[in-house]
Image (spheres, helix red, strand yellow):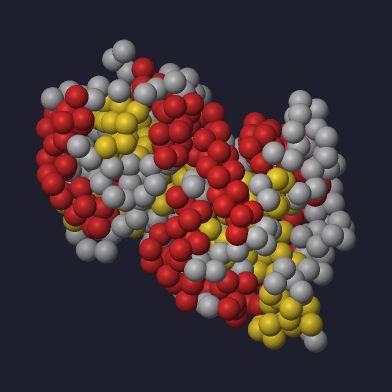
């Protein structure tokens, strides 16, 4: 069972529908007991970093996620959920992330040529930097759907794939049992479903 | 490289897609779920569903259908039609929409754009504008393109973007239904005025029109069309191939 952590940001049904489409059982939950019993965790997220981070800290879910990940349970952060895996974000102020991965989250604004629109919205090709279990069913150059204005940097250690948008945008990260996707696999067609399928199969 | 998007648009009335024709391998052409899945499998980058139902029963049916689409189609879904209040945003987002398209609702109450963007983020709010040339200027029309609002279009679009519209669909009434190609002049004027993604709509009659669009306006992000896809005049897979052969980067 994969627990999709529900901490009050965004609609999680697309994600659970997508896992269902690849035959994986999920539960959308904020219950610490359910999270502890789950085989894997997914940390979703939309909106602003500060708000989401504060909401995750309510009821101590942040500490629980950190503890579970450090104990070896596979964890995948998606979009803002991926950004939260890092040490820090500079979205409207400075916020501490979960610190599970080295690196920080910064604005694209000011780092791209002016003709590049922000947010980075649309389908962009993945360029693999390291091999990963997540890529079991997809290929170099496959496109996935992005919607974001901030990106992770200083994360060489965990960098698995980038997407070119004037600069190399961190697309996929992973160290040990902790994974993250900046894009939305649940909105990335067959390629996205295949990433979720690979995650669902990890360790099993 | 970010790819250029091809977006089919489906008009839905009382839970059924209006104006569909027969496709091979598609038994129910007026089912939003079947057609949405068909387009997604064919390589559509996104789907737009317009609810053109007038009754509240039909509207309820639309949200039920939307849920079913979201359970079966895993590409971004934009929903428009009848979006007048922030409650309408809630209603369609809860059913699986990723973005909400506002048009007449924003004309009546421009703060709807701001409210939507504050609550759900800029990326969630798509401004759809029906535009026609009147007395030498681009004019915004309301109510499905029937009523001249008297507002100049470029300033209207800039205003909405400054309030948080994260994307703009430009539908040229002048080229809509004519099938002689997109309104390059109008689209250029919009692309030059804003720094958010712009989606071209109105006028596509053949696959080559999309090539012309992306060649003439390299910074435009997407092309949207309805009837040429529904009537099978243009197959999305073949369109993508043609664009690729013309060095337009597509998925």
**A32 horizontally vs B186: left or right:** left
Q: Position of residue B229 (x, y in %)?
A: 77, 44
Q: In the image, is A99 to the left or to the right of B137?
A: left
Residue B200 in which image quadrant = bottom right
**In x, y percent, where is residue B94?**
45, 50
Residue B183 visible (yes or no)? yes
Q: Position of residue B208 (x, y in %)?
A: 82, 47
Q: Residue at x 78, y 78 (%)?
A: B133
Find residue A184 and report its image quarter. top left
Question: From this viewpoint, which residue is outermost toward the top?
Answer: A204
**Which of these two is toward me, A168 or B156?**
B156
Quadrant in the picture for the C terminus of chain B: top right
Which quadrant: the N terminus of chain B? top right
What's the residue at 55%, 38% (across, down)?
B68
Q: Nearer the viewer, residue B68 or A2?
A: B68
Vertically, is B95 above or below A111? above
In the foreground, B196 or B111: B111
Which residue is rendered at x = 82% and y = 65% of the image? B175
Measured as percent of width and height from the top left, residue A81 is found at 30, 43
Kindly give the residue lying farthest to the front in the view shown. Answer: B57
Residue at 57% x, 52% y: name it: B60
Tally of numbered tags:
0
Q: Is residue B87 left or right of residue B194?
A: left
Q: Is residue A123 visible?
A: no
Which residue is at the front of the view, A100 or B59?
B59
């Amino acid at each position: 069972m994969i627990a999709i952590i529900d901490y009050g940001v965004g609609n999680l049904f697309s994600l659970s529908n997508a896992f269902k489409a690849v035959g994986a059982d999920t539960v959308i939950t904020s219950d610490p007991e359910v999270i502890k019993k789950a085989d894997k965790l997914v940390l979703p997220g939309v909106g602003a970093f500060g708000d989401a981070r504060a909401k995750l800290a309510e009821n101590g879910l942040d500490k629980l996620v950190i503890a579970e990940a450090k104990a070896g349970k596979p964890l995948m952060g998606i979009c803002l959920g991926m950004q939260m895996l890092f040490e820090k974000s500079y979205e409207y102020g400075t916020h501490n992330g979960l610190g599970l991965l080295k690196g920080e989250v910064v604005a694209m604004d000011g780092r791209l040529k002016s003709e590049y629109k922000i947010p980075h919205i649309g389908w962009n090709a993945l360029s693999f930097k390291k091999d990963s279990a997540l890529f079991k069913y997809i290929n170099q150059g496959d496109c996935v759907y992005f919607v974001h204005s901030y990106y992770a940097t200083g994360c060489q250690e965990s960098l698995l794939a980038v997407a070119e948008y004037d600069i190399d945008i961190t697309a996929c990260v992973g160290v040990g049992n902790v994974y993250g996707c900046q894009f939305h696999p649940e909105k990335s067609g067959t390629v996205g479903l295949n990433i979720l399928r690979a995650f669902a199969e990890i360790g099993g | 490289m970010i790819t250029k998007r091809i977006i089919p648009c489906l008009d839905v009335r009382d839970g059924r897609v209006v104006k569909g024709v027969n496709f091979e391998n598609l038994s129910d052409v007026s089912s939003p779920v079947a057609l949405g899945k068909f387009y997604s499998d064919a390589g559509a980058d996104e789907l737009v569903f317009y609810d053109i139902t007038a009754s509240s029963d039909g509207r309820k049916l639309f949200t039920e259908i939307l849920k079913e689409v979201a359970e079966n189609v895993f590409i971004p879904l934009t929903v428009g039609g009848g979006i007048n209040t922030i409650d309408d945003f809630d209603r369609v987002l809860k059913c699986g929409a990723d973005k909400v398209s506002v048009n007449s609702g924003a004309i009546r109450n421009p703060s709807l754009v701001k409210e939507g963007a504050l609550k759900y983020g800029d990326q969630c709010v798509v401004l759809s504008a029906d535009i026609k040339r009147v007395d030498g200027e681009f004019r915004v029309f309301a109510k499905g393109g029937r009523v001249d609002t008297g507002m100049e279009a470029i300033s209207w679009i800039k205003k909405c973007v400054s309030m948080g519209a994260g994307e703009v669909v430009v539908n040229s009434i002048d080229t809509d239904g004519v099938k002689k190609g997109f309104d390059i002049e109008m689209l250029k004027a919009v692309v030059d005025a804003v720094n958010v993604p712009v989606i071209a709509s109105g006028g596509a009659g053949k696959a080559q029109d999309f090539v012309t669009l992306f060649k003439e306006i390299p910074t435009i992000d997407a092309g949207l069309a309805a009837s040429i896809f529904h009537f099978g005049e243009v197959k999305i897979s073949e369109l993508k191939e043609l664009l690729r052969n013309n060095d337009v980067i597509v998925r």
